[in-house]
Image: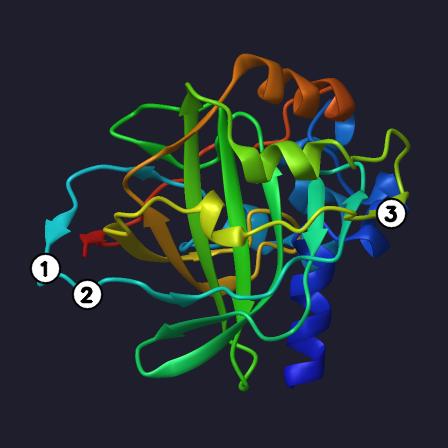
Amino acid sequence: MKAKLLAVVLAAFCSQAMAQDAAHWSYEGEAAPQNWSKLNPEFMLCEKGKNQSPVDIHGALQTHSQPLNIDYKLAPESVINNGHSIQVDVKEGDVLTLDGERFVLQQFHFHAPSENTINGKSFPLEAHFVHMDAAGEIAVVAVMFDIGKSNSALEKIWQRIPAQIGQKAPLTEKVDLNNLLPKNLTHYRFSGSLTTPPCTEGVRWLVVQQPMTVTVQQLNAFTSVMHHANNRPVQKLDGRVIVSE
């Protein structure tokens, strides 16, 4: 089961393997999000699911503060242009501790504009840090970026973005992942899904409330490689409760 779920998360969260056959799904044209469920029977949750992501975060219930326990110590290894996003591959060992469980960082990638919105506000860029525990459960930490000062960690990654889909480039400069996270890790939490096919549900979403910053030039460097927006539209909450921790 763990191996199967790991294959799902690495493929569905903008992996190189799925992107090599771009006909599977896309963000535009006949294979755009509104048609994902029609492309493959395995994508039916994209239309029929009741716990889909992303969402508009509003009316969150305040709970006792439970700061995110993130321990990122290792520098990422490489950058992949998979046609769906820019994905950064990491060494195994960076950890998120959540609900008393150890979730290991698998990879992280970016969406422009943001997929989740907060009180109706869309952000220019959103990073998704994808984690998995020993049982194959998935937890995603999402960080928003507003236009502002340059981000040094992003700059090192952006300098290595391959221009061609399917290409991978090693990161030649050490990147401290903590520089992609704000100091205040107060966050929203809800149950959701993968934001790409097969839209698997049961994902623990943690959206950090304080945004980081990115310059217009850095944002343009990303969007010029993508050539199109790569965000799935927000989905209905369908009775789900969002909490603020």
In-front residue for pair 104/42: 104
Q: Position of residue 55 (x, y in %)?
A: 38, 40
Picture disc at residue 209: none
| Residue 174 vertical position relative to residue 10 in the rendered view, above or below | above
Residue 52, visible in the rendered structure: no
Q: Is residue 198 left or right of residue 123?
A: right
The quarter of the picture where residue 54 lies is top left
For the residue marked with disc 2, what is the amino acid? Gln
Q: Residue at x 74, y 34 (%)?
A: 26
Assign a secondary structure to mark 3: strand
Q: Position of residue 202 (x, y in %)?
A: 45, 67
- Residue topped by disc 3: 168
For the residue marked with disc 3, what is the amino acid? Lys
First along the sequence among labels 3 and 1: 1
Assign a secondary structure to mark 2: loop
Mark 1 touches mark 2? (CB < 8 Å): yes
Dot 2, how many residues are within 10 Å of its Cα: few (below 14), some (14-19), or many (20+)?
Answer: few
Q: Is residue 211 left or right of residue 2?
A: left
Q: Disc 1 versus disc 2: distance between alpha carbons?
A: 8 Å
Front of the two marks 1 and 2: 2
- Residue topped by disc 2: 66
Residue 92, visible in the rendered structure: yes
| Residue 98 vertical position relative to residue 65 in the rendered view, above or below | below
Q: Residue at x 48, y 75 (%)?
A: 103
Mark 3 touches mark 1? (CB < 8 Å): no
| Residue 211 vertical position relative to residue 7 in the rendered view, above or below | above
